[in-house]
Every structure is written in C-alpha cells, then in structure tokens.
Amino acid sequence: MEEDGFLRFYETLSYLNLVYIITLGIFMIQAIESFTNFVPAFYKNMTKVCPNYGGCRLVQSKVVEPDDEKREAYIETYCLKEETYKLCKRYITRKSLWICPDFVLPDTNLTEDEIIDLYEKKEKQT
Ligand code: SF4
C-alpha cells in the first residue's frame, strides 16, 4: 500500500518534471526567437540615425541652435533617417572638411568654400 503511494508520488513528480521541461523549452525557444528578431531590427534602426548624432553639437547642445523648437525640428527632419541625414549640410561639411563649425545649420545655403572662409575669419577674430 505504502509502495503504491510512493509510486504514484514518483509518477506525479516525473509528470511535473516533464511539464516543467516542456514549458522551459517553449520559453527558451520564444526567448531565442525574440532575440533574433530584435537584434536585426535594432541594428537596422541604429544604422538609420546619422553617424554624427552622438557628437553633433546641434543635437547634443544648444550652441548651434538655441531655440528648442527649431532644434527639435532639425533633428526630426534630418538626423533620424539615412535618406535625410545625407542631405544635412552639417553632415556633408563634416564628411568633406573633417570639421563642422557651429554656424553651419543643416539647411544652410553656404557652399563649402564659404564655410571655410567664414570659419577662418571667425578663427582670426578669436
Ligand atoms: S544629421 Fe546633421 S544635425 Fe543631425 S546629427 Fe547628423 S550632422 Fe548633426
């Protein structure tokens, strides 16, 4: 009689272990699937943002554009998408001249030569 009880208990325990292992397996499969979906999506989103975003003084300070609304509009318009950051004059200037002076706004009409001239003039004044 006591042996029957032990066997039933043992069977129940084995059954619970099996349920536990299956549940854990399903959870792990879902976790792996979520991770493998998340990584490419995360990488894809990251590559859309301008590579200068982390160090750009327009984004990271109020020096280039003190007006919060205008700065947010610039960020929204230029910084977050690959097809728009490539049109940003600050991005273009930094790529070709290796510098981007604070007076250069994303939509400025200044040419690279004008930017260099203005930059040199400002440097002489300081
Ligand atoms: S898009 Fe222009 S303003 Fe935005 S982070 Fe890049 S360089 Fe700076």
Image (cartoon, rainbow, N blue to C red):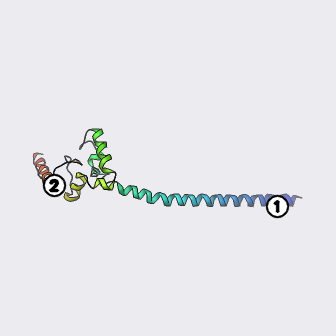
Which residue is outermost to the front? 83
Single out the mark in the foreground, 2 or 1: 2
Residue labelled with disc 2: 112
Residue 72 found in image quarter: top left
Point out residue 18 in the picture as x, y percentages from the top left corner. Answer: 70, 61
Point out residue 54 in the picture as x, y percentages from the top left corner. Answer: 32, 51
Gap between marks 2 and 1, in whole Å? 85 Å
Mark seen at residue 107: none
Residue in the image at 44% along x and 60% along y: 40
* Mark found first going from the N terminus, 2 or 1: 1
Indicate left or right for 45 with 8 as reference: left
On screen, 82 above or below 103?
below
Indicate left or right for 119 with 76 as reference: left
Three-letter code, disc 1:
Leu
In front here: 109 or 21? 109
Residue labelled with disc 1: 7
Mark 2, other Cα within 10 Å: few <14 / some 14–19 / many ≥20: some
